[in-house]
Amino acid sequence: AQSVTQPDIHITVSEGASLELRCNYSYGATPYLFWYVQSPGQGLQLLLKYFSGDTLVQGIKGFEAEFKRSQSSFNLRKPSVHWSDAAEYFCAVGPINTGTASKLTFGTGTRLQVTL
Amino acid sequence: DTGVSQNPRHKITKRGQNVTFRCDPISEHNRLYWYRQTLGQGPEFLTYFQNEAQLEKSRLLSDRFSAERPKGSFSTLEIQRTEQGDSAMYLCASRRGGEQYFGPGTRLTVT
């Protein structure tokens, strides 16, 4: 069965510092990979996705993520964090075969706190 | 593109009551999903519709839960005889291509 591990439950960084959020997945084949962000009491906003091709993908709000097949990882990075980035971040995987339900499997999330 | 909308945003109910939530997907999206998110967890898949057909249900969806999408547009999720364990955020998503777009969710509190 597929699973997603986000080993860091809570991370605190200073504004302007760099950020890396870790995500490891277990899947039968190369899946679609996603990062979502959730502000308190809100739904999820898609930050970026990897389907195929270039393993470094760019997303919104200055985020990027790198797919490493050998490590089954899809870590999220940002070179300089802004206070407004404080939120919960979820990594998710889904099957490439879009003929199926393509339901997403999420990690448990990493809560990012930004100090000024 | 007005996004996915969900109503109500918050619902407080007493144990044993029935509740119904509504999801309006993005208009051209024919695939619709329901997820449940409990405190400190990521969303978990509940059920999936393609047009009006419910094609997959999670084992999390007990007999007390029912979902419909009668005309392939909006969807409803009903929980009968609510239990305290049903307290969660219920998220709806619609899909275009490989991407799922989420609504703001309905937060259910069962007292």
Image (cartoon, grey):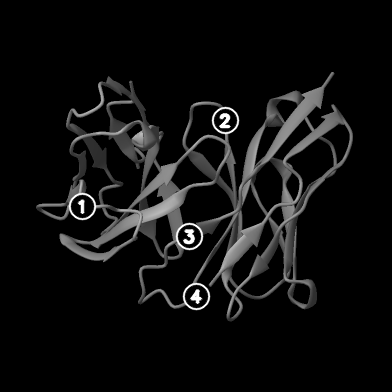
Which of the labelled discs sits on residue A96, or is there none?
Answer: 4
Amino acid under disc 1: Asp
Choose top left, top right, bottom left or bottom right for residue B60.
Answer: bottom left
Q: Are marks 4 and 3 in contact (CB under 8 Å)?
A: no
Amino acid under disc 3: Leu
Q: Are marks 1 and 4 in contact (CB under 8 Å)?
A: no
Q: Rate crowding at label 4 as few (under 14), some (14 to 19) or many (20 or more) other CA atoms within 10 Å.
A: some
Which of the labelled discs sits on residue B27, or is there none?
Answer: none
Q: Nearer the viewer, mark 4 or mark 3?
A: 3
- The Cα atoms of the two marked residues, 3 and 1, are separated by 23 Å
Amino acid under disc 2: Ser
- The single residue placed furthest to the bottom in the displayed view is A29
Where residue B56 sits in the image (x, y, percent)?
A: 28, 66
Query: Image point 70% across, 31% down: which residue?
Result: A85
- Asked which secondary structure carries label 4, the reply is loop
- The Cα atoms of the two marked residues, 4 and 3, are separated by 11 Å
Amino acid under disc 4: Ile
Up/down of A48 relative to B17, above or below: below
Indicate the chain on which mark 1 is placed. Answer: B
The residue under label 1 is B63
- Asked which secondary structure carries label 1, the reply is loop
The residue under label 3 is A104
The residue under label 2 is A39
Where residue B2 sits in the image (x, y, percent)?
A: 34, 37
Question: Looking at the image, is mark 2 or mark 4 earlier in the sequence?
Answer: 2
Indicate the chain on which mark 2 is placed. Answer: A
Question: Looking at the image, is mark 4 or mark 3 earlier in the sequence?
Answer: 4
Q: Are marks 3 and 1 on the same chain?
A: no
